[in-house]
Amino acid sequence: MFRFIFVILVVTIFLICSIPLLLILEIVGVFNKESKENISSAVISWAFGMIASMSGVKLTVVGEENIAQNENVLYVGNHRSIFDIILLYHLIKKPAVIISKKEMNRIPVFNIWERNIGCLFLDRKDIKQGLQIILQAIEIVKTKASVIIFPEGTRSKTEGEFLPFKAGSFKISEKSKCSVIPVTFINTGCIFEDHKPFIKKTHVVVCFGEPIVTKDYTRDDFKELHTLAYNKVVEMYNINKGLAD
């Protein structure tokens, strides 16, 4: 319980103390929107790394060389914990847009940081709004940044359990022809979700698969893309799960 209280306290202090910086970034954004987004991304990446460290996460990264360096891509992965987002955003170290559930837009101050880095907030019950979010993501990956999405649609409840990937998430790749990087998270649920409200020291493994290059894909190829990405994520889990012991 002490670790949970400590993390919440530090995050709260950070959010309060960051308000002056947010005001400065608003001014920066009037003159240079790209600089505002890049600075915000760097701050959030640092803050997420701080949260992981304070939470006692021991991190092993497999396939770090597969993180995109010079192109915008679609990152897709299994989803067990809020720490999936925290660790992934910290690891890629480049501006990226997260497609997140709309409830995340209700956290005071943090929601401003989310908007500063371009987060898209998805209402899972509104099909029309979901389509609009996908269209925005397609334009973003074409023009300025990578996109992060968890195509299971919700968090799985059990370690080693994988929900089917929703094909609609992969329209982002189909319409932009961007590569897809599968990401596997091992043991992230053991940090917090498996024993709320406690945060426990946990050895976590994050695996980045080789990019699935889609620029020459046919329409039939794209119909199978969600299955291919799903299989890659499961395969990396089965190969690397022993590293978390």
Image (tube, grey):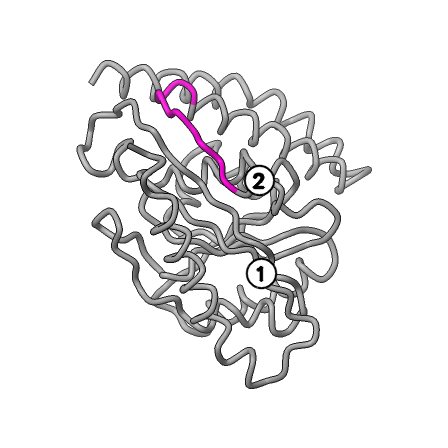
What residue is disc 2 on? Answer: 64
**Residue 175: x percent and y percent?**
64, 73
Going from the N terminus, do you reach mark 2 or mark 1 first? 2
Q: Is residue 92 magenta?
A: no
Does dot 1 land on a helix, a strand or a loop?
strand
Is residue 55 shown in magenta? yes
Callout 2 environment at 10 Å: few (<14), some (14 to 19), or many (20+)? some
Q: In percent of the image, x 69 and y 76: which residue is there?
A: 216
Would you say 113 lies left or right of 95 here? left
Magenta span dominant secondary structure: strand
Q: Is residue 220 above or below residue 51?
A: below
Q: CA distance from mark 2 to mark 1?
A: 15 Å
Give, as a three-letter code, the residue at label 1: Val
Contact? badges 2 and 1 (CB < 8 Å): no
Count of labels in the image: 2
The disc label shown at residue 180, or none: 1
Which contiguous range is marked in magenta?
53-62
Q: Position of residue 92 (x, y in %)?
A: 59, 39
Q: Amino acid at mark 2?
A: Glu
Tell me: residue 232, above or below residue 68. below
Name the residue rendered at 17%, 33% in the picture.
195
Residue at 67% from the left image edge and 69% from the top image edge: 177
Q: Is residue 70 above or below residue 60?
A: below
In the image shown, does 173 or 120 lie closer to the viewer? 173
